[in-house]
Amino acid sequence: MPLLETLKMILKTFKLAIVLYASFWPMLSCADIGDDELLQRGEYLALAGNCHSCHTVEKNTFMAGGVPFETPFGRIYSTNITPDMATGIGAWTFEDFANSMRQGIRPDGTHLYPVFPYTSFAQLIDDDLLAIFTYLKSIPAITQSAPDNDLSFPFNIRQFLAIWKYLFLNEYVFEPDDTRPDSWNRGAYLVEALTHCGVCHSPRNFLGAEKRHSKMAGGAYSDKISGVGYRKWFAPNLTSAPTGLSLWSHEDTFSYLKTGRNSLVDSFGPMNEVIFNSTQHLDDQDLDAIALYLKSLPPIPVAESQPADRKTMGMGRTIYNLHCGTCHLPTGLGDPEMAPRLNQGSLVVQAQNPASLINVILYGPEEPRPPLPPKWLNPMDEFQYMLDDAEVAALATYIRNSWNNNAGLVTARQVAKQR
């Protein structure tokens, strides 16, 4: 072998050794925790962060990316976070990983779009970042590149994200509140950082950044409906506002996150992935801490909706009695065997934005897969072919303004946007 080729091979081997050493030296230096325990902790944290839902298209491509996200600026695909050397994070050092999680920066210095919630992950402590990194390095490597993003100008120019981050990214590690109990601080850390609830449950400004003064007060986003495509959804208010989480008890909140079901509602739609890929795997102590923290959030009032008129309410009452009253009852209280409660128990019914309720009426509540044990005798019908836009709007308006509900008018135009 020529001398030059030999030197090139030695240099490549030396570079690979440096990469591997830099990737694993933090783990090797972590003397107070065993490898198995670190891996288990990392897997638990990755479950809590719901990495699976955002980075897995099919079971045989676990964490290999390619999941599409529809945004007001275009479509963005998640990336490969398996330890593949070519298309994943196999060549990343721990510092590379930490920079991506806290600053949204790739090893080559390019910016990551904030669809990846580094605005929340920035608060993660070093030990948790290390555990997640260790776990991701242990899963099977899959060679798979994400499709190219499809973003409109100027949002397709990543360099502009430096300005966005200057305005909206607070890179600080979570600090416990000494005036609060440990369980509350644990819940705050999980909600604000790891499970990043505010990413969906907070309103956003015209540049796509969370509105900090309205954090957890409800947020609109796009997500898929099987057989239909992407539609707008609205994640409800999680503060203790009258139409928010004040409607649920601590036990209701805990049970919903643990099982997808509580005394009032069952999970449906986008929350299915959150619960069944993430929160159901958390231990009871952590779920209790999350419920404790969420129930402590002060109420954030939302803008008043347009009041319902008598004509719309009358039309809605007729449609409700014809199609819904048998199962949900004329009182809206539901029935343990027939249908869930609509009277002051559903955060979706009471939400400021009726998009999610409209989706349920049009397409039916998309159930978890695999399904929960049967609770209702019959699944809810879809009404997209039975009711026109004005009828769906009247029905939704009636439900949102009857009994103890007070959530405002729904218009035919809002329904048309969801079709």
Image (spheres, rainbow, N blue to C red):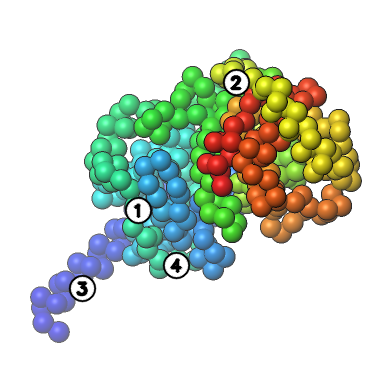
Q: Earlier in the sequence, mark 3 or mark 1?
A: 3
Residue 212 shows in the view: yes
> Looking at numbered disc 2 in the image, what kind of residue is underneath it?
Gln
* Quadrant where the image shows the N terminus: bottom left
Give the residue furthest to the top.
179
Q: Is residue 53 above or below residue 254?
A: below
Residue bearing the label numbered 3: 9
Is residue 176 or residue 84 the one in the foreground?
84
Question: 24 and 175: which one is in front?
Answer: 175
Kindly report the distance in space between the C-alpha atoms of the residues bearing marks 2 and 3: 72 Å
- Tags 4 and 1 in contact by the CB under 8 Å rule? no
- C-alpha separation, residue under disc 2 versus residue under disc 4: 51 Å
Q: Position of residue 235 (x, y in %)?
A: 59, 35
Task: Name the spot of residue 299 as percent of width and height, x first.
Answer: 62, 17
Read off the residue under disc 2. 306
Q: CA distance from mark 3 to mark 4?
A: 25 Å
* Comes first in the chain, label 2 or label 3: 3
Residue type, mark 3 in image: Met
- Which residue does the image show at 33% across and 48% down from the upper left? 151
